[in-house]
Structure formats: C-alpha cells, structure tokens
Image (cartoon, helix red, strand yellow):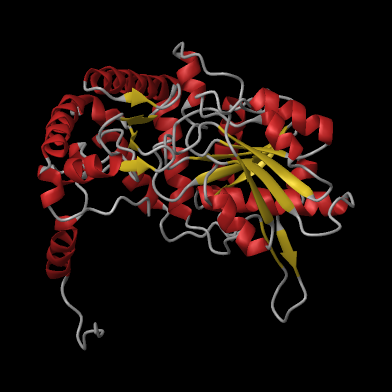
C-alpha cells in the first residue's frame, strides 16, 4: 500500500515519475483517441494551460474576493446565450461538466414544478432511450423516477415525441431532447418535442453538452442543423459543455435558462448554521478559477471565425469517415451532422472490431444499441483519419479470418 514518503522529493524526480505514469495512457496528442479528449491543436492547448494556471489558485466560490472570475463567468454565459439564441433575461452559470449541468437543470425543474403544485407523488422525467446516463445519475441522487421511451422505429434513431407525450403525467417535471445524443450523434426533433411540452405545460431541457458549442458554427458553415436551442419556444433550459467542442480545459460546462425566474430555483442559499450565510449557484462549493479563466480565454482566442474553422474541419473529417467506412461495408447509424458518428457492419460484430482497432493503438468507443463503432472526432483527426480507415480495414480482415478470436478480449466500455 502506498505510504506518504517521510521526506519530499525534488521536482525533476517527480516530473520523471509523472512522465512514466502517463506512458501507457491513451496517446491523444497524436490523434489516435476519439473519446474523452478534444484536440484542437497545440496553440489552443497552450491557451488552455496558460489561462488555467493564471487563476488556478483562485476560487469561484468567492465572487467578492475574486470579481475577475465573476466577470469572466458572466461573459462566458453571455457568449453562450448569444450563440444559443437566449432571449432577453436568459441567464445561467458555469459548472464542472455535463453531469453537473444536467443535475442542476433537473433540480431546478423539480423545484419549479413543486412551486406550481405539480408534484403530488414521486417526481419523474421523460426522456428518449438515447439520452445520456447523467440524467439517471441525477435522478438517483434526487429520488426521481426515470421514464425512458423507445426511439422512433423508422431508422432515424430520433426521439419519438408522440410516445414521450404518452409517458407524461401530473408528476412529470421534465422532458428531455438531445442535440445531439451521445450514442449516435443524432439531433432529436426539438421543435416537435417542444410542441408536446408546451401543450402539456412541461419543462423541456435540451442536452446540448456535445453540440452546444458545435452546432451554431456548423450551421454558419452551411450544415443543415435543425432548430434546437432557445429559438424554439418551449425550451426552458440547456446544458452545453465548454470542455468538449468549446475546447476549454476540463472541467467546464454551462447550464442555461430561458429566464431569471427559472434560474432562481437553482441556487442553494442557506444561513441556518454556525458559519456565515452561503449561496452557491451550482452543486459545487469551491469552483476552480482555472476552469473559468480557461474557458473565457479560449472563447476569446478562437472567436466565431476560429470556431467555424475548427468545426468545419471536424464535419469534413466526419464525411471522410462516412465515405471510408461505407466502402468497407459499414452502415451509418442515422444521419449525424456534427462531430459524432456511429457505424455498424452487417456481418462483423462491433465489439470484436473494437478490440482489433484498440490493439492497433486506437482508443475509440462503441455503441450498444445497435452494436456499432463510435467516433467523437476532433480537428486533429483530419490529419490521421486515413490511417484509422486503413487500420479498420485490417481489423475487419482479422475478424473475418477468425484471428481476432484467438486474442485476449478487450472490454468495450464507456467509463
């Protein structure tokens, strides 16, 4: 068992050990990782690091002590709402990540519903089968029932608004749509979901953790992105991750609300203890100043022009993936239009292919329903995607020949 050393070591020795510890980690800087990390290039990484370390000791918990962080967060939220068509009075806060943003949106929706006398029994949320598991985690924490509804059966892999509408009742505090969902990269029909939500007077949350800082720029570049944000009447809240396609340092996300009234149900405000009264906007107490400053710096560094260039590069790479895998006999799952793509082979099992591609140095992902290979692309992948397709062809050959079955299995898991 590891014990703290009696005497400290010098930094060069510790730095050497850190390098050794990371030797077996995924090699994301070389472009062979298509999950967990969003590689926008060395220049953006430098901005991330420099801005983070500039405020790494400051604490977002204390806006009076650190008005710089409060102002940067305010400006990040304003830029986010500008991209996502936030109306006058819209607001929000930065969080530590998508799960944090989703948790706070659910807490806010639940408390808002309680204020209107809606919830008499156990609160519930209604969401498509493809919605992120963070909703289930948050529901577990708050003892909220989760009602997952099957997707449309037309091969689109989209949420089914009519079926979701039938799952609503007087105790429903939230409906959910994804833009896009994580398993397939598909944007749900947010306008249709919003019509159901407005008719039933239900809070609609759009999980744009993946697409919030991608879809607006893809649309500017001419991609046929459907309405998905606050431009759609009925969307009450959104989650959008800055540390995904916003290219900020981990962990930075945003949770956004249509109005100050809705937002007012999110903060925790408590004075009934021996210490000073405290008010926190999100789940966290201490909030790393570096996450705020890094997000602010990257957004200002890239600007609209920079984001359009990066997201355009990702979309073009996704099209190259689609063409390449189709040539190998794969089928694309649904119609992705951002940076996520899932594809399946009618004869070769995705998990066996995943093991083979992993052995060739690629750290990617898989989707269970349907069994598919899964890529979350970054700008860096434009430089290496032909190598991936070549290795995928070799992986297909290994699975066909039975060679893959003779090797130690690789667990396919998103964790």
The one nearer the camera, 157 or 12, is: 157
- Residue 333: x and y in percent read 41, 27
**Relative height, residue 108 to residue 17 (above, below):** above
Determine the residue positioned at 38% across, 50% down: 52
**Relative height, residue 170 to residue 272 (above, below):** above
- Number of labelled discs? 0
The one nearer the camera, 55 or 250, is: 250
Determine the residue positioned at 36% across, 21% down: 315
Determine the residue positioned at 28% across, 39% down: 349
The one nearer the camera, 184 or 249, is: 184
Q: Quadrant of the C terminus?
A: bottom left
**Left or right side of 322 for 18:** left
Determine the residue positioned at 50% across, 13% down: 224
Q: Residue furthest bottom?
A: 6
**Left or right side of 40 for 198:** right
Q: Residue furthest right?
A: 117
Q: Is residue 63 visible?
A: no
**Left or right side of 194 for 98:** left
Q: Residue furthest top?
A: 222
- Residue 294: x and y in percent read 42, 44
- Residue 275: x and y in percent read 69, 78
Q: Is residue 372 visible?
A: yes
**Relative height, residue 351 to residue 184 (above, below):** below
Q: Quadrant of the N terminus?
A: bottom left
- Residue 2: x and y in percent read 24, 82
């Amino acid at each position: 068992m590891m014990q703290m050393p009696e005497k400290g070591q010098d930094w060069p020795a510790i730095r050497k050990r850190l390098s050794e510890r990371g030797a077996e980690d995924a090699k994301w800087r070389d472009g062979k990782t298509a999950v967990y990390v969003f590689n926008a290039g060395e220049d953006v990484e430098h901005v991330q690091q420099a801005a983070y370390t500039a405020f790494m000791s400051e604490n977002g918990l204390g806006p009076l002590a650190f008005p710089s962080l409060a102002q940067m967060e305010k400006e990040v939220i304003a830029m986010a709402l500008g991209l996502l068509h936030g109306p006058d009075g819209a607001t929000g806060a930065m969080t530590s990540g998508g799960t944090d943003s989703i948790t706070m949106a659910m807490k806010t929706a639940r408390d808002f519903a309680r204020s209107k006398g809606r919830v008499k029994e156990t609160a519930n949320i209604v969401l498509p089968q493809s919605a992120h598991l963070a909703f289930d985690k948050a529901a577990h924490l708050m003892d909220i029932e989760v009602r997952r509804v099957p997707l449309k059966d037309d091969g689109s892999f989209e949420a089914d608004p009519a079926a979701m509408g039938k799952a609503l009742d007087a105790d429903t505090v939230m409906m959910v749509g994804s833009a896009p969902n994580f398993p397939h990269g598909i944007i749900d029909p947010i306008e249709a979901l919003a019509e159901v939500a407005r008719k039933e007077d239900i809070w609609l949350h759009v999980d744009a953790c993946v697409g919030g800082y991608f879809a607006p720029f893809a649309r500017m570049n001419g991609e046929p992105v459907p309405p998905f944000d606050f431009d759609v009447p009925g969307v009450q809240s959104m989650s959008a991750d800055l540390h995904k396609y916003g290219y900020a340092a981990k962990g930075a996300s945003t949770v956004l609300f249509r109005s100050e009234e809705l937002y007012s149900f999110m903060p925790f405000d408590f004075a009934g203890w021996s210490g000073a009264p405290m008010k926190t906007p999100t789940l966290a107490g201490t909030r790393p100043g570096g996450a705020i400053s890094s997000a602010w710096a990257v957004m200002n560094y890239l600007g609209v022009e920079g984001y359009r260039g990066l997201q355009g590069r990702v979309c073009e790479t996704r099209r190259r993936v689609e063409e390449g895998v189709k040539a190998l006999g794969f089928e694309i799952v649904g119609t992705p239009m951002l940076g996520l793509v899932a594809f399946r082979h009618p004869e070769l099992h995705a998990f066996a292919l995943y093991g083979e591609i992993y052995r060739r140095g690629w750290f990617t992902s898989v989707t269970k329903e349907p069994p598919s290979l899964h890529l979350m692309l970054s700008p860096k992948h434009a430089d290496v995607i032909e190598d991936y397709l070549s290795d995928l062809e070799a992986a297909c050959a290994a699975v066909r020949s039975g060679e893959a079955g003779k090797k130690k299995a690789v667990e396919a898991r998103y964790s």
